Structures are given as structure tokens and as C-alpha cells.
Image: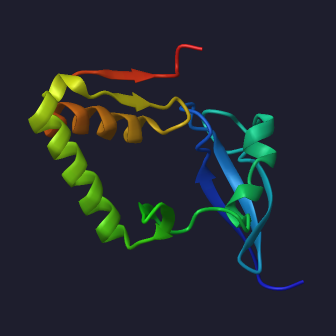
Amino acid sequence: MGNTQEVKMICSYCGTGCSLVAEIEDNRIVKVRGDKEGSVNKGQTCIKGSFAYNYVHADDRLKTPLLRKEGRLQPVSWQEALKFIAEKLTTIKQTFGAESMSIFACARATNETNYVTQKFARAVLGMNNIDGCNRT
């Protein structure tokens, strides 16, 4: 057994905000359990919170942005990807107006992430077309 530690975290699978404890061994998550000190879930967790962590270490997980160049997706820097996105959004806004765009928020994201999403839509893009999957 190598280097082990426990890391407290907030589950990101929905907006509930359950407290979890990740057991880390040699820099890899080996187990996740509910944090009994968590005020929201008091140690309980759903099946996703407990068992859906293998994606973190998946070999086929995207680890860098990709842009289509010459018909193929190719790795690019974060700076290049963000510049591309900003230019495309600016072009769409100038060509078709802010109301031609929309943003889809996610119930799996934290409340803070959803707040920043709606703030970006309103303050930067200049529109109120925001929807989410939290009705289901």
C-alpha cells in the first residue's frame, strides 16, 4: 500500500451539495463515501456520488481542448480554444443579435457554477435565454 489520504469534497453530480470523502491511494481515487459530518446528507449518498468516480482516471477522458482543423479534431492550448470561442460568440452576437443565442445550465453543476453561467449570459452576452435540466 502506497501513499494514502482522505479528501473531503462536495459532490458535483447535482445541485444538492452532498459532502463526500474520497479515499486517495497513490494519487488515484479508490473509494468515495458520504461524509457523516455533512450537514446536507449526513453520510448518505446516492449511487452516483458513491460509485461514479472512475471517469476521473479514464484513459479516453479529454484532457486538453480540441478544435477542428483541416477536417480533424486536434489538440490546442486553452488560450487558443478560449480565443476561438470568444471570436465565434462575438461574431454571432454582431451578426444575429444577442437574442439569437441561449445557454443551457445544468442541474448537476453547483449553484455557484449556475450563478456564473446566468451572469455570463446576461452581463457578457446580453441576453436572458437561459434554460436548464433541473425541472426533471
Return the x and y of residue 3 as percentages of the image width and height.
77, 84
Task: Name the residue located 74 percent from the left edge and 72 percent from the top edge.
Answer: 28
Task: Name the residue located 70 percent from the left edge and 64 percent from the top edge.
Answer: 60
Determine the image quadrant of residue 14: top right
Of all residues, the one furthest to the bottom in this rendering is 2
Task: Name the residue located 47 percent from the left edge and 60 percent from the top edge.
Answer: 71
User: As rendered, which of 26 and 128 lies closer to the eye?
Assistant: 128
User: As rendered, which of 115 and 8 lies closer to the eye?
Assistant: 115
Q: Is residue 103 left or right of residue 48?
A: left
The quadrant of the image that shows the C terminus is top right
Depicted 121 relative to depicted 2: above or below: above
Return the x and y of residue 52 as percentages of the image width and height.
76, 47
Return the x and y of residue 65 as percentages of the image width and height.
46, 64
Q: Is residue 36 left or right of residue 61?
A: right
User: As rendered, which of 100 and 127 lies closer to the eye?
Assistant: 100
Q: Is residue 68 left or right of residue 39?
A: left
